[in-house]
Every structure is written in structure tokens, then in C-alpha cells.
Amino acid sequence: MSLASETRPMTRREWLLSDRPQSRLQARLGRAYMTWRRFSANRLAVFGLAILLALVLVAIFADVLAPHSPFAGDLAGARLLPPGSGGYLLGTDDQGRDILSRLIHGSRLTLVIVVLVAVIAAPVGLIVGAVAGYAGGWVDAVLMRITDIFLAFPKLVLALAFVAALGPGIENAVIAIAITSWPPYARIARAETLTVRNSDYIAAVRLMGASPLRIVFRHVMPMCLSSLIVRVTLDMAGIILTAAGLGFLGLGAQPPLPEWGAMIASGRRFILDQWWVATMPGIAILIVSLGFNLLGDGLRDALDPRESGQ
Amino acid sequence: MIETVRTSGRRRARSRKAVAAALQFIIVVATTYLGLLAVTFFIGRVIPIDPVLAVLGDRAPQHVVERTREAMGLNLPLYQQFLIYCRQAISGDFGTSVLTTNPVMTDIRRVFPATIELATVGTLIGAFIGVPLGVLAAVKRGSIADQVVRVIGLVGYSVPIFWLALLALLVFYARLRWVAYPGRIDIVYEYTFTPITGFYLVDALWQGQWDAFRDVFRHIILPASLLGYFSLAYISRMTRSFMLNELQQEYIVAARAKGLSEARIVWGHALRNAAVPLVTVIALSYAGLLEGSVLTETVFAWPGLGLYITNSLQNADMNAVLGGTIVIGSVFIGINLLSDLLYRTLDPRTRAR
């Protein structure tokens, strides 16, 4: 029996699921495969992933996909047309611009905001948390106190105040949101660090003479990544909503940029008679943040079965 | 003899522990509020290149600029400025609003009850609907009902509140005429209705003005329901997970073996044990609504702190913005810390052993 299985060539699936991986690559691919299988069993999560892939594709090919210009409208003949009329699938706004084209181009802004916030806030939180957890003592106490202080602040109001001081604009909105969103990441990174800092492999690395900096960056931080990714994904929806809220208040992206929150704000005046101007961008925001929430839930279940409560 | 010595020693150790815990709590409170002040100080004084310019505009004559600089204490070293700032903020002095020309604190005292009333009604709605929904989802786990509750929660997490508010206005005010137009109370009552506490629902009830009460209710119900929906999303999700956790415990099996009715087990036993963390969740969602009211109030022209902050923002009235930020931040922090404290006192398992 065992002889037969050894002579028969392994299928790709068996190779991936082997409990005696022959190489590091095989082990990694095997783990990734298991994670993917858990993830893809969750239909809603796959749906969320599909939404986000679609968003990325739309953002990349915005110029090709958009039927009209997002900035130049037909002021004379196409103001506030209802959806479906005259080749404007989702209608036009008060300046005769095609709403669909503006939404398509706005997906770029949404992606830029989300990615920038994640790129700024996640590493800051990761470094603060990992250093605090690994160093311990007063470093830990001070860093965590600062983290807790920021964690206790109301995020949106603080972001508002920051943007009020920095001046409106998409860059400042990103900075303000990033400043208010790193603390949970620091908390998570610290918790993960505390679970590994006394493990044998860290002791082994230390005995081999690795500097604390190297240990933190090369051996502790990678262990924090999976729970951090889950948390960042779950936070993306909140980031989108905050950015849209800032845009709605006129503090985020400035006109004529087709930012979705600002589009809702400009459609607000016409809500009673031309409902589609404000409604369409809201649907776009809802779909994208729903996508992030679904993906985040699915990732949490797949990467961290303990946390999922299943 | 030895026994009494030992217990008194233990008691002393316990009281020492309690003192240490209280001290730690005070330090946490103090540093958190200090942090809030430091951040607002940073926003108001350090980020603007010239705060005088921010106050006076760029057309003021030179001697006025100098005098204002001195009056604002900007010639002092930064740490002294910060100390003065803290002293003023603690005594409730946030400067004067450029927009209304009142002291910011007076303005805030006028508008804050509106926000509190809105957030309170919102939280009540969220809790009274969210908790039963969460319990239902946990008991009928995996059923259609569970899925529906999950979707309601997911959409609540994902929808932009100001957009939903606009749509709600369109449907329930403009089309169906079920609720009153944006604002707090109809202009008809301007002279007949005198607010005492600033909480209009309470005031109208207190004075027995039923017409006014009905009108206030028709004004508050839509924005409060929207805020309630958001806390419902959070509360129902947390209730579900707490209840799932409790329903797996052995005492539930024991209660079942005793022959208790399912309703008794769910509502009397499981929910009671889930109640402690739920109280903290509801407190946190209340704090969240205070913050969420900023966008909702803007849409509904609700004359609360959120609208005050956004109006001031649009007019570059930094004193008012920062004053509002400090007040919302303080209440937010206070609720956070209180819920933490509440959790520790209510749940015997978390007490120091």
C-alpha cells in the first residue's frame, strides 16, 4: 500500500497537502493552499474579493471604460438627465456630466485613499506595537499609553480637526485618517509579539547573536502580519466611509475631482427632484465598503479560525 | 490568633491593591485627557504657520498683529503656552467663536443638549432592537433569520450615514410625509414652547404640551432611527457572539436538564450572563453615536454640536472647532473609561484575585 502510493506520482493537490513538505516553498504553498480552501469555501468572502478585483480593474481601465469625460459636461443639452436617457446610463449631474463616468474615475481616488492610509498607518502601528511588545518595561508602558490615548479619541472628529488645520484636500484627508487609524494596529502587533517573544525560536535567534532590531524586524513582525492584514482589511470600509464623510463636508477631495463623497454633497441640493445625482455615488460607496467588509470577515475566518467564533 | 493575623494581612494586601488600582485608573484618566489637550493644542497652535494670521486674516495692520500675538501668548516658549492652554481648557475657556462672537463654551452649552438627546434616543432604538435581533440570530444560528440579521449588520457597517440620511429624507419626508422637515421643532412652537433642560422631548412632557411633544417626536424620529440603525448593526453583532458563547456553557446544559423552558434559558440565564459585556458595548456605541452625529446633524439641520462644528469648519472658526473637538473627545473618553470601570465592577470574574 505504502509502496504503491510512493511509486504513483503525486497529484498536485497531494503535493500541496503533504504533511511532510520537502522544501520551504512546498510548505508555504501548502499553507497558502489550505488558507485559500478555507477562504473560498465562504461564498460571501469570495463575492467580496470579486467586488474589489472589479474595483481595481475599473480603476486601472477607467479611461477605456468611461463613456464620457468625467470633467467636461454638456451644459446646454444634458443637465440633470434621469438615468438611462440619451446614452447616460446613470444620468447626469447639474453640470451635464455623465455620473457613470465620474463614478468610474472616482474609483481611482477611493483606491488611492485606501491604499495610502493603509501604507502609512499599518507600518506605523506594526513598528510601535512590535517594539513595545518586544522591548517591554518602560518603553512598552510609554508607547502603549500613547496608543491608548489615540485609541480613546473620536476618529472622525479628530480627523475633521486635523483637516481643518491642514486645509482641505485629498492628501490632508489621507494624513488625518492615517493619524487616527494606526492605534488598533499597534495593539494587535503588541499582542502578537507578546505571544512569540518568549518562544524557543526567538531565543535561538538571540543566541545566534542577532541584534534586537533584527529580531523585531525579521522574526517578530512577520508573525504579526496575518492578524494585521485581517484588521486592515476590516478597517478599509471604515476608512472609505470616513474619507467619503470628509468629502461630503467639503474637506476631502476638492471639486471638480469625482470623489464619491463630494459627489453626494453636490447632489444634495437636488435630492428632492433629481434623486439620482446623490444616490448613485452612495451606492458605489456602499458596494465597495461592503466588499471590504465581506473580504475582511472571510480573511479572518480563513487566517485565524480561533477568532472567528465558528 | 495566627489565623486573624493572616486574614488582616490579606485584607491589608487587598486594600493596597485597590489603592494601586485606583491610582492607576487616575493616571490613565489624567494622561488620556492631557493627550487630548496636547493634540488639540498641536492642531490649533503648531500646525498653522501663524496662528495670528489664522485669527486676524492677512489684512490686519502690523501693530494689531503684534498686540494679538502678545495677547495670545505666542511670544512665550511653547511649553508655557501649553500650560496656559491646559489651564484655560480645564476651566472651560476655549476662546471666542469668530462666527457667533460668543465664548465657545456658551455656544457649546446651548447646542450640546440637542446632540445628547439625539444620541440617547438613537442608542435606545439601537439597543431595544439590536439586542433581541442578536439573541434571535444566536438561538437560530445558521437559519434564515441569522442570515438576515447578518446582512442588516453588514449593510449598517458599510453604508455612508449621510447618504442614507439623504435617502431617508427623500422617502419619509418628501414622498411619504411621515416625518417633519429637518430641524428640531416646528416654528409654530417658537413662542409657546420654552425649553428648560434643552432636551425637548423631556421638556415637552414635563410641561404637558402634547402637541409640542408630538412635533418634537416627528422631528427626532428619523435622525434618531438612522443613528439607531448604526448602533443596531454593532450591538446585534456583539450580542450574537456573546450569546453564542454563553449558550455553549455547561450551566445551559444544566438548566435544560432541569427542564426549564427554552425562553427562560435564553432570556433568563444566557442573556443575563451576556449582559455585562453588553453594557460596555452599548456604552461604546453611545460614544460612537455622539461622534456619528456630526454627519447626521449636518444632513438633518439638527442644531447640535455636530452641526456647530461643521458650520465652524466651513467658516474657518478654529476656536469653535477645537472647543467642540475637546468636548466631544472628553465625553467620548469619559464614556470609554466608565464602561471599562463598569465592566470591571459588574463582572466578578474580572476583579483582582
Image (cartoon, coloured by chain):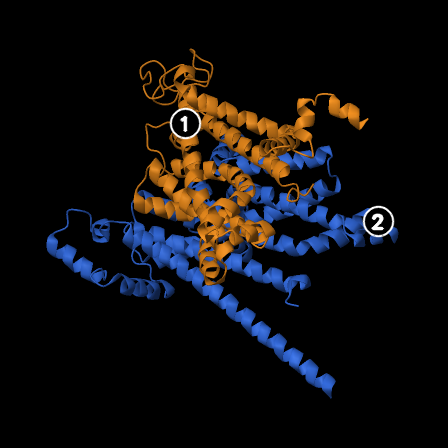
Direction top: furthest residue: A86
Tag 2: residue type?
A: Ser
Name the colour assigned to chain A in the rendering. Answer: orange
Q: Are marks 2 and 1 on the same chain?
A: no
How dense is the environment of label 2, judged by Cα within 10 Å: few (below 14), some, or many (20 and up)? few
Image position of B98 (left or right of B331): left
Question: Residue at the left extreme?
Answer: B62
Q: Nearer the viewer, residue B276 or A279?
A: B276
In front: B130, or A25? A25
Q: Secondary structure at mark 1?
A: helix
Q: Which residue is mark 1?
A: A108
Q: Quadrant of the C terminus of chain B?
A: bottom right
Is B92 situated above or below B139?
Answer: below
Colour for chain B in the figure: blue
Q: Which mark is residue B261?
A: 2
If the image is split into quadrants, where does the N terminus of chain B sit? bottom right
**Type of the residue with mark 1:** Arg
Residue A178 x %, y %: 41, 43
